[in-house]
Image (spheres, coloured by chain):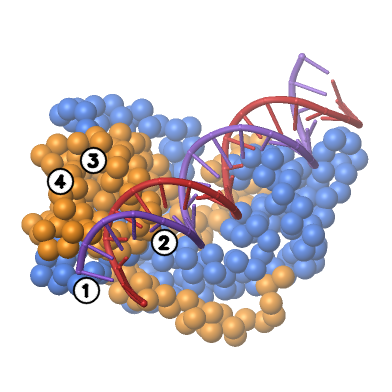
Chain colours: A orange, B blue, C red, D purple
Amino acid sequence: MTTSSQHPDTALDRDDALRADFGWALGVVFRAYRRQADAVIADVPGGPRGYHVLTAATRPDPLSQAAIAQEIGLDRTVMTYLVDDLEGAGLLTRRPDPRDRRARLLELTPAGERCIAAVEQRLAVVEDHVLHGLPDEDRYALRCLLQRVAQQADAIEPAGDRCQVMTAIANGTESIR
Amino acid sequence: MTTSSQHPDTALDRDDALRADFGWALGVVFRAYRRQADAVIADVPGGPRGYHVLTAATRPDPLSQAAIAQEIGLDRTVMTYLVDDLEGAGLLTRRPDPRDRRARLLELTPAGERCIAAVEQRLAVVEDHVLHGLPDEDRYALRCLLQRVAQQADAIEPAGDRCQVMTAIANGTESIR
DNA sequence: TATTGTTATACTCTATAACTATA
DNA sequence: TATAGTTATAGAGTATAACAATA
């Protein structure tokens, strides 16, 4: 994304400044992972979100479209298209809920389960590839640290705690522009 | 994003499975950071990309729009709108290049420099907030590890090395669906 | 009256191509 | 002929609203 070899003199300074940034590193790693993950998931209808729906439908007690949409934070209108495609590909089925004739329960087909297994296997390869430069012990450390931050963030974020940030930020000097 | 409190019995199992995943943790942390970063940057015209252009224009020798677009991987058509807005907000100026009358050199105004300084300061607060749960030494470790992975990824990715992944993946069983 | 799922409409982003003025 | 910047057009993706069936 950076690495401009045309301006080596000044570019190095800028790149070093960027490289010292946590946000930059996080973004680079995330995008590297996601680019490869997307390539892996490209085959499943609906891409990453289709896969997300598939994994959300993996449970002993089937959920309705609305329940799954809410769980993974999707609009229920896109759910329709997504499930249309997934069902068309034979990865899951819509079954009328006997207790509520409005609702459709989503159930994985054997092909759907195989799909998930295949993707998971390939994602492991991608992860391995992204962490390529790190020896095993460092990978483990990185995993653990990320995990801790993620659990923290996942616990705080969902309710939207942007105000905290904004008030903390309000101590800044003037308006941004 | 997850945390469905409606189905505590099975949801726990699923969440634990997800929590063991590197990609999941990476995504959660990245989105947490970016959500807050976006909120911080929302004031600058063009959002994150506007800010990106601004930082790219921070250099002693001004660059043309095309040069900056190439450096940060932007299409030159969106550059026009972006620079329109940034110039309209008085954060940078277009100056005709005396050596090439086709090109426009982008130069930060004092207001633009103040903007960058303000945003950087606020991004530091965001970073601090995201890493909230980690003690200082662990933050340092996480930074270093991410940095190493990022530099590796940044060095490999740009040229697109998806084929490596796909060939590595080709050892998988059958097609995904 | 509220909710599930569907469909239709509008809006935003982005990518493509065409145009000008320079080189 | 190729390039810098601009403008216009088309497409994908997303959100909004309206609708039918059921609760």
- Location of residue B48 in the rendering, given as x and y in whole percent from the top left corner: 59, 58
Q: Work out whether residue A105 or residue A54 is closer to the camera in this orientation and state it.
A: A105
- Read off the chain for label 4: A
* Tag 3: amino acid: Glu
- Asked whether residue A84 is in view, the answer is yes
> Where is mark 1, residue-wise?
B5
Q: Is B149 on the left or on the right of B105, as rendered?
A: left
* Tag 4: amino acid: Leu
Q: Residues within 10 Å of mark 4 (few under 14, many from 20)?
A: many
Q: Work out whether residue B61 or residue B172 is closer to the camera in this orientation and state it.
A: B172
Mark 2: secondary structure:
helix
Sequence-wise first label, 1 or 2: 1
Instruction: Classify B125 as above or below B47.
Output: below
Question: Mark 1 to mark 3: distance in Å?
Answer: 27 Å
> Where is mark 3, residue-wise?
A87
> Where is mark 4, residue-wise?
A108
The residue mark sitting in front, 3 or 2, is 3
Quarter holding the C terminus of chain A is bottom right
Question: Mark 3 to mark 2: distance in Å?
Answer: 29 Å
Question: Mark 4 to mark 2: distance in Å?
Answer: 28 Å
